[in-house]
Image: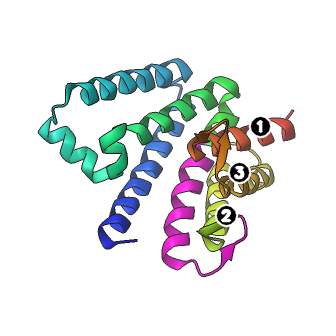
């Protein structure tokens, strides 16, 4: 990976972590709910699709996009990452009780970001589940994510949910030619595990 791509991924994952923690906190405080999150996701979807059809690059917005969005998405589907993330959080908030939804979004925020950062910069051991990803990233991510999620659900449940979610995040999931984003896989899998454990 080139230095500018590494910096882009670091910025993306840092933003991912900050937004995830903010959404989880606002859900916990009942300031946000599934309807508001879904409305925001649809608003962003409409806005970015409109911009794509407009063929005009709004200077400030385009600069912001270039800081956090991958080049291929800027050309084809600007804002894709943010929209996927919001839809995943909205679906998680809609499907699960508040404590489980918050814990699952925490696992998404910390798990995905830390797994990528640690795995890329400090990882040494590849895994048979993915040719590029390193095992050290998910191990550190599971520890941190389950610790933070443990403030909302029992720690041992959070540990199991985070472990399963990070294992499921390794392979590329494709159904009928559609790539399933890990922003969806991580919170839904951890949410269902927590729901089963806390039933």
Q: Position of residue 24 (x, y in %)?
A: 54, 38
Helix, strand or loop for disc 1? helix
State the residue at coordinates (12%, 40%).
Answer: 59
* CA separation in Å, label 3 and label 1: 10 Å
Camera-nearest residue between 183 and 130: 130
Q: Residue furthest left?
A: 59
Camera-nearest residue between 97 and 114: 114
Check contact, mark 1 vs mark 2: CB within 8 A. Answer: no
Camera-nearest residue between 58 and 40: 58
* CA separation in Å, label 1 and label 2: 19 Å
- In the picture of the structure, the residue carrying the numbered disc 1 is 192
- In the picture of the structure, the residue carrying the numbered disc 2 is 143
* CA separation in Å, label 2 and label 3: 13 Å
Q: Position of residue 97 (x, y in %)?
A: 70, 28
Nearer the camera: disc 1 or disc 2: 1
State the residue at coordinates (62%, 53%).
Answer: 148
State the residue at coordinates (70%, 36%).
Answer: 100
State the residue at coordinates (19%, 47%).
Answer: 63
């Amino acid at each position: 990976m080139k230095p500018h791509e590494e910096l882009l991924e670091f910025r993306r994952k840092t933003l991912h972590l900050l937004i995830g923690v903010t959404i989880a906190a606002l859900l916990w405080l009942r300031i946000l709910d599934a309807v508001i999150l879904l409305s925001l996701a649809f608003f962003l979807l409409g806005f970015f699709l409109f911009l794509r059809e407009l063929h005009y690059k709004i200077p400030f917005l385009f600069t912001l996009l270039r800081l956090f969005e991958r080049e291929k998405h800027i050309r084809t589907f600007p804002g894709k990452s943010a929209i996927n993330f919001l839809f995943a959080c909205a679906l998680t908030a809609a499907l699960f009780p508040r404590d489980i939804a918050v814990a699952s979004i925490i696992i998404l925020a910390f798990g995905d970001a830390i797994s990528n950062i640690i795995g890329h910069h400090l990882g040494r051991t590849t895994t048979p589940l993915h040719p590029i990803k390193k095992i050290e990233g998910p191990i550190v991510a599971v520890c941190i994510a389950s610790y933070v999620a443990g403030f909302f659900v029992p720690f041992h449940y959070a540990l199991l949910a985070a472990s399963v979610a990070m294992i499921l995040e390794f392979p590329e999931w494709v159904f009928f030619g559609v790539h399933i984003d890990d922003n969806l896989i991580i919170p839904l899998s951890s949410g269902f595990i927590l729901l089963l454990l806390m039933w």
